[in-house]
Image (tube, coloured by chain):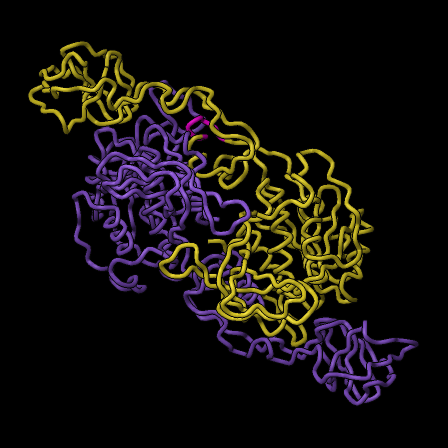
Chain colours: A yellow, B purple
Amino acid sequence: MIRMPAGPLPAQGQPSPRLPSSRYMISPEEALSYVLQSAQPLDARAVPLDDACGLRLAEEVRADRPYPAFPRAMMDGFAVRMADAGKTVKIAGEIAAGQPSDLELTDGHAISIMTGAVCPPGAEAVVQKEHVRCDSGQVRLPDRLALGSHIAPVGSECRPAALVLQPGDTIGPLAIAAMASFGMESVLVRPRPSLAIITTGAELVGAGQPLQPHQIRNSNGPMLAAMAREMGLDRPLAVHVVDRLDAIMAAFQQVSERDVVLLTGGVSAGDYDLVPEALNQSGAETLFHKVRQKPGKPLLLARRGRQLIFGLPGNPLACHLGFSRYVATALRIMQGLEPSPGPLEGRLTGPVSYRGNRTYFGLARADRVQGLSSVWHVVPLSGVSSADIFTPCMANCYVEVPPGVTEIPAGELVRFTWIPGSGD
Amino acid sequence: MIRMPAGPLPAQGQPSPRLPSSRYMISPEEALSYVLQSAQPLDARAVPLDDACGLRLAEEVRADRPYPAFPRAMMDGFAVRMADAGKTVKIAGEIAAGQPSDLELTDGHAISIMTGAVCPPGAEAVVQKEHVRCDSGQVRLPDRLALGSHIAPVGSECRPAALVLQPGDTIGPLAIAAMASFGMESVLVRPRPSLAIITTGAELVGAGQPLQPHQIRNSNGPMLAAMAREMGLDRPLAVHVVDRLDAIMAAFQQVSERDVVLLTGGVSAGDYDLVPEALNQSGAETLFHKVRQKPGKPLLLARRGRQLIFGLPGNPLACHLGFSRYVATALRIMQGLEPSPGPLEGRLTGPVSYRGNRTYFGLARADRVQGLSSVWHVVPLSGVSSADIFTPCMANCYVEVPPGVTEIPAGELVRFTWIPGSGD
């Protein structure tokens, strides 16, 4: 788990801490601190139960009534009286699950009963149908009966108003079942952030358009949308703009209601010459705009009110790292989740090399070693350049190489972090 | 990884092996074998690129052209000639990314160029703008130039028609980026199975309906839908029917086009008295219908053509195990994925007890031990009965207790398997 650099997350509604704006190159750890400090859990919102799985609860959930709400038969068989052990008694009726009944059980009688049905008043035990002999309306009971056997008493599984789920609990399928039992149709949660992706760059051509030799297709937009979707987010609003200040400003206006904005690539007059100006004129505050990392040095974080804006490099591998390490962290915090699932450890099958003075994040593929649990092989998948998305196509994780280290040799134990959605 | 009991999966289109139909109680391992042998990868289908992430590819993907398609500048700076090292040369123009240009570079000149732009004919290197001094239309070049520096040659990242992805590859965000680069708008994959959930039982009341004291709300339907959704499936078709043969038959007819049908619970005339008959009359073949496990003994598997039908117990914990262990496996195989992500190992924080002669699957919560990777604490969350969904609400895994073992004590290392969608 990545530790918060400055204590716990700011509570809902509190002003976020005042961050010193850094326009100088900062370390990847400092950049992550900015993300951790500027991302805040979103306001709680009611969502239909159908959409709540995987989200964090923002209210207490208490049982609406005792469970079971009636003494429930746990087996198909007969409701009986203790006094009738070893006797042959008359079958006085039948009660099916979901059937209201005014039957009452008295000595000398048994009532045929189904799993899940209401045990009648007077029932002291349920005997499995496999353990009795029935004949012409009568049933011969075992010699020994255990008081209360195969009857779940009222409230034995859950008392009325018992606290079953608490704010902050992650809603799983069993929590869905419990809330459905309580008759809840919606639940208060930290919602999934809404996302907008603004792609810029005159060289970019969308799918289905004719392509000139000097142009390339928009690959960052679909890649970022896929990563967001793998994290469970709704389809992002996608906007493509040309590299003009007024166009970028208009796009910012268009996405002003989104919780997070990703701006990617190709500001052709030089990296982020237009973007900081557009951010400035839009009333956004730039928190940092360069990080000592490879790939992805020209990474930018800004905020406008509670909206976070990430300026991701146009280089596809740099864009990918920007989402994996920084955007995904912000998206998780906004949902009230842990900032990161934390690294795992695995053994490198080949060297990871980097010559430079930045922190290097190398793509790799981690696979579980056959037959052994929790042991991973990590295969480096470095491309020939930081624009090569083809060689590392099957990567599912990153391996971090600290500045000053030129190679981690094959055979070393390394920590790796999943690419969002690739976790096993 | 769960090993296949009878060799590899049957290939697409082959008839599935003839399975002996078992109407007797079988072990959980045998039940899983039936699932592994009867589930088959679905026919390949083209899906939009937007929906393809996480699926298995069913075609080869090859590069549509070389990458880069033109000699690409990797930095903002100047395209230069080797002969001009150390000289001051005239700036003969500018080329932005995405801009076609008929400029040609000759000795004594430099051309201002942006990252991602087409290097002009004659360019032998790109010099970063930080490494030169510009003044009144001229630029002073460094004394040493490296041939080809900061220029990515045509095809250096990917040759034309290079095989980039193969059938069987799992499509991740980088694969989406590569396919988007190649101009693909859809891709042939093993699709996600379509699912129907038929809930039965007179005692069940849906959300928003008034509830009588002898009734309970439908919790299995929402729980199964949540588990399916956590596995990435589309919203299932949900049908509720009363416990009558004709109603169950009509429901089977209604869901005949679905790949997988889950039938859950509450057949009030006794477990599966109506269902096998309905399956039989619908032309389905029942493969097994009882498993020596707790919870979830009355589990049923049938098939009708290529459709798989699971009869899950009405008991919510039994229903949950049925999905987690058997249905999820079938859904993964149908998508061409590994049958199971395989168990992890963790240390029990409390005992797991079971008195009985079946295999016991106990719910638990596995959490990563703080600060250490790959070390898990496993907290047993057994409820008071197998209908108690409240106590184990926060469970994320199962611990298996073999038959004959009455207790696994606290402190033991145990294997656990994730509940679908709970994996870290």
Write the start and end of the magenta stretch as one range. A179-185
- The furthest residue to the front: B411
Instruction: Give the camera-side residue of B70 and B79.
Output: B79
> Residue A125: x and y, percent?
22, 19
* Residue at 63%, 70% in the rendered image: A406
Q: Can residue A196 be found in the magenta stretch?
A: no
* Image side of residue A21 versus residue B346, left or right: right
> Residue A228: x and y, percent?
57, 52
* Residue at 54%, 58% in the rendered image: A416
- The furthest residue to the right: B136
Would you say residue B186 is visible in this rendering?
yes
Instruction: Give the camera-side residue of A367 and A7.
Output: A7
> Residue B227: x and y, percent?
42, 43
* Image side of residue B138 versus residue B145, left or right: right
- Quadrant where the N terminus of chain B sits is bottom left
Instruction: Give the camera-side residue of B211 and A271.
Output: A271
Instruction: Give the camera-side residue of A283 and B126.
Output: B126
Vertical side of A192 occupied by A325: above or below: below
- The furthest residue to the top: A106
Would you say residue A314 is visible in this rendering?
no
Circle count: 0
* Residue at 16%, 43% in the rendered image: B24
Instruction: Specify the quadrant of the image occupied by residue B280.
Output: top left
Vertical side of B22 occupied by B88: above or below: below
Vertical side of A374 occupied by A361: above or below: below
> Residue B274: x and y, percent?
21, 35
